[in-house]
Image (cartoon, rainbow, N blue to C red):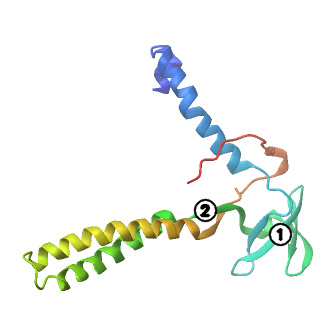
Amino acid sequence: MLAEIADGRGSWIAALLWMLLVAPIYIVYIAEAQAVPNPGTRLRLEFRDRPGRQPATLRLVKGDSIGVWLLGRDAMIAFNQLARLEVRRGERGSAGTGAVIGLVAGVLLGAVAGAVSAEGTELTPQTLAAIGAIQGGLFGAGAGAVIGLCVRTDRWEVWRRGWSPSNSAPVQFGIRLRL
């Protein structure tokens, strides 16, 4: 599609749709990925010479190093000392995970409850187990999604290697969609 637009063979509608739908999403994604974190942002540092991640708080970015609050004291750390640097970019909910867990639990419990309650009815235990599984699955998925929305976890993003203040500027615009 882009080749047709560049060669002039594509319609102006295709070019307009690309500019209105695809380009803004791409620009916002790149801008957010390269945005410089503010002082006070939580970090997770993984050093080249020792295993594990160390929690830290960003104080300043200066040249090819960062100033952080690490292990109860201020420290300046060069980027080349780090194997990995993660930045906290807010929180996220777990509605999808909660819905799946609730669905599985609801199907199992509903099927058992339906099969056990078959005595004294004209329906077979298999039919009642299927009805119970459907009802239990729907209820469990809904309850799990609500509970998953309430459970908030940190959203971590790897700070791109090779980043330095000279090749990245903070971006003050963007769109964030969130469930």
The residue shown at (50%, 15%) is 12
Checking the image for residue 48, the label placed there is none
Q: Is residue 23 left or right of residue 97?
A: right
Of tags 2 and 1, the one toward the viewer is 2
Q: Which residue is mark 1?
A: 57
Kind of residue at disc 1: Thr
Task: Point out the residue furthest to the front here.
Answer: 120
User: On screen, 119 above or below 96?
Assistant: below
Q: Quadrant of residue 50?
A: bottom right
Q: Quadrant of residue 144?
A: bottom left
- Where does the image place residue 38, in percent across and percent down from the top left? 83, 56
The residue shown at (39%, 67%) is 141
Q: Which residue is mark 2?
A: 92
The residue shown at (79%, 69%) is 81
Secondary structure under the numbered disc 1 in the rendered image = strand
Q: Is residue 74 left or right of residue 111?
A: right
Kind of residue at disc 2: Arg
Q: Earlier in the sequence, mark 2 or mark 1?
A: 1
Q: Is residue 69 left or right of residue 112?
A: right
